Amino acid sequence: MLILDCFFGKCEKPTCDGCGLVPVRNLRRALKARSMDAGDDASDEAWKKAVEQTLAGNSQKSNTSKPMRKKRLLVPREEIPWYPTIKPDLCNGCGDCKVLCKPGVFELGEPDPTGVQRPKLVVGHPYNCIVLCDRCVPICTSGAITLPKKEDFEKYVEYLDE
Ligand code: SF4
Ligand code: SF4
């Protein structure tokens, strides 16, 4: 059903322009934004909880929000290969990653020459990615975004609040 496709970010229409379901898309993004605010380790659980709270009419921010930990990088950012990868075959061009990643890592890719599909997203600015952040992984309900293993990157970071 189209409304559920929109809500779960699975719509395959080539654009949202002029679509009457834009409010549904906006709700989906608001829910995902709240899920991301739940902390560094936003997970499927945080996303589900945000959905349940909103559907129950509780528009207050989750009280599970965790403060961002203060970190310092131990080498220049360009020497740390921590950034997401998008699997193009799974990306449906919903754009949620671009809208919700505040550092601006994602960019629109090339338009589909046939005009049938939305442009897929690409990792346009990998070194804008915050080392050890993984918030975009659970908000991509298509499972298109992957990140390296966190434990391999802890060596590049010093926590200032310990
Ligand atoms: S990577 Fe995921 S969140 Fe980003 S546009 Fe593609 S499907 Fe949507
Ligand atoms: S992991 Fe990187 S790309 Fe993903 S939301 Fe965080 S800063 Fe953005």
Image: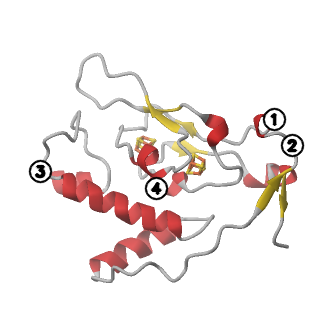
Q: CA distance from mark 1 to mark 3?
A: 45 Å
Q: Quadrant of the C terminus?
A: bottom right
Rounded to the nearest angstrom, the CA distance separating label 1 from label 4 is 27 Å
Q: Which residue is mark 1?
A: 79
Identified at 36% across, 37% down, the residue is 93
- Asked which quadrant contains residue 117, the reply is top left
Tell me what residue is drawn at x 87 percent, y 52 percent.
155
Secondary element type, mark 2? loop
| Cα separation between marks 2 and 4 | 29 Å
Q: Position of residue 98 (x, y in %)?
A: 44, 43
Q: Quadrant of residue 77?
A: top right
Q: Say which residue appears at 31% left-offset and 56% top-offset.
A: 8
* Residue behind mark 3: 20
Q: Amino acid at mark 2?
A: Val
Residue 154: numbered disc: none
Q: Residue furthest top?
A: 113
